[in-house]
Amino acid sequence: MSKGYNERIRIRMESYDTEILDQSSSAIVDAAKRTGCRVYGPIPLPTKIERYTVLRSPHVNKKSRDQFEIRTHKRLIELEDANAKTQTALVKLELPAGVEIKIKA
């Protein structure tokens, strides 16, 4: 790695539960700050809302329906000047189930 080059890692997280998402993002930020890299985020991204309408009864009462929605919350964390210690610290993190993480280096 040359001197003028900044190693940048982008971490995008998705979850249905905001509390678990915020806990895991704070764990990632703490681990990254301990290794000495600059942290930008967590940046909240727009929430994806999927709505479904279902008939309550298949044969009668056509007007009687239930509506459900699934909200997918997203966060973005950017790490600058990341080194090998940062990458090993991120790999060793124990994050809760229900959080999908995509890492771009």
Image (tube, helix red, strand yellow):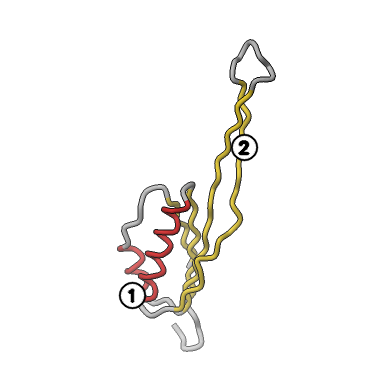
Residue for badge 1: 85
- Secondary structure beneath label 1: helix
Q: Label 2 amino acid?
A: Arg
Residue farthest to the top, as pictured: 59
Q: Which is more N-terminal, label 2 or label 1? A: 2
Residue farthest to the bottom, as pictured: 3
Question: How far apart, in angstroms, are the residues tagged by discs 1 and 2?
Answer: 42 Å
Say which quadrant the N terminus sits in. Answer: bottom left
Between tags 1 and 2, which lies in front? 2
Q: In the picture, residue 33 is in which quadrant?
A: bottom left
Residue at 55% from the left image edge and 61% from the top image edge: 44
Q: Nearer the viewer, residue 4 or 93?
A: 93
Residue farthest to the right, as pictured: 63
Residue at 69% from the left image edge and 19% from the top image edge: 63
Total marks in image: 2
**Horizontal and vertical percent for residue 72?**
54, 48
Residue at 45% from the left image edge and 52% from the top image edge: 100
Compared across the picture, whether 79 is left or right of 53 comes to left
Q: Nearer the viewer, residue 41 or 85?
A: 41
Residue for badge 2: 51
User: Residue 42 shows which numbered tag?
Assistant: none
Q: Nearer the viewer, residue 85 or 14?
A: 14
